[in-house]
Amino acid sequence: MAVAAGLTLVLGGCAMATTSPGEAREAAEPVVLVGAGTVDCREATCIALTFDSSPGTNTPELLDILRDEEVPATFFLLGRNRIEKYPDIVRRIADEGHEVANHTWTHPRLTEIEPDEIREELVRTQEAIAEITGEEPTLMRPPQGRTNDTVSEISRELGLAQILWSVTAKDYATTDSDLIESRVLEQADRDGIILLHDIYDGTVPAVPGIIEKLKAEGYTFVTVSDLMAPAVPEPGVIYRP
């Protein structure tokens, strides 16, 4: 699959090319999307809602909200003390049609550890998710968005596309749900990827307002993979709106 060159990500003085969801769609071979409920983001104003470091004690409430609002999300799951502690919630995330993705086992900065350790972080999480859901993820999000050529190569080997974001509420630093909501709304744009953490107390209460207001502005919520359709996220590639 052809991947269009996009923005340039600079980490530690190293420039790395990234591709946006829109550019990925443009580079894909033309197809007609069919099927009940399919959203064509070439026509619709799409945005992806994503949650990092799930699951946790707040996740069932979040899943109730997403179910009631008929909003799909992408969950980047953390292994230690998350996947292994809450397998039933992981199973529910998958069963309710949300996209399940990899956020490593222990949340290290992947750019600061050895290649074998990077591989272990990702493989262990892949295996834990597959044991619960029956499928290995095809997406990963490097903790803190930190990636480099080594991370990209290992991700490619493991069949994982790297997904960054365009909207962050910095919900790890506040419990003010109104502030979280306003930050998201201020940054939202077409083909955006919203980064939130349902493990923090202020985040889940902000989600209904975020959904209501963005829907009112004409946005359609999709998973990260659906945001790129008909393109398929390519392993190793860094995607950022």
Image (spheres, grey):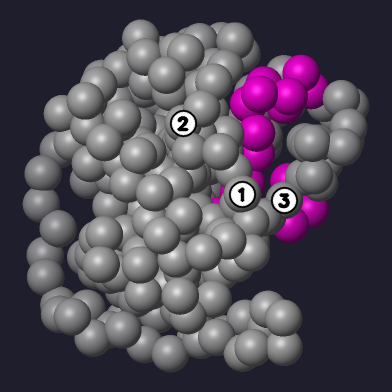
* Residue 57 position within the rendered picture, expressed as x and y whole percent measured from the top left: 59, 10
Q: Is residue 39 left or right of residue 144?
A: left
Find residue 27 and report its horizontal and vertical position in percent.
Answer: 27, 84
Tag 3's secondary structure? Answer: strand
Q: Secondary structure at mark 2?
A: helix
Point out the tag, 2 or 3, that comes first from the N-terminus: 2
Q: Nearer the viewer, residue 122 or 120?
A: 120
| Residue 231 seen anywhere in this rendered image of the structure | yes
What residue type is disc 1 on?
Pro
At 67% from the left edge and 83% from the top edge, which residue is drawn?
Answer: 10
The image shows residue 61 at horizontal and vertical percentages of 56, 10
Q: Are marks 3 and 1 in contact (CB under 8 Å)?
A: no
In this view, 121 is above or below 14? above
Residue numbers of the magenta segment: 184-204
Label 3, on which residue? 168
**199 or 73, which lies in front?**
199
Name the residue tied to disc 1: 108
Cα–Cα span, label 2 and label 1:
12 Å
Q: Is residue 189 magenta?
A: yes
Amino acid on which the number 3 mark rests in the picture: Thr
Q: Amino acid at mark 2?
A: Gly
Check the picture and name the quadrant holding the N terminus. bottom left
Disc 2 marks which residue? 79
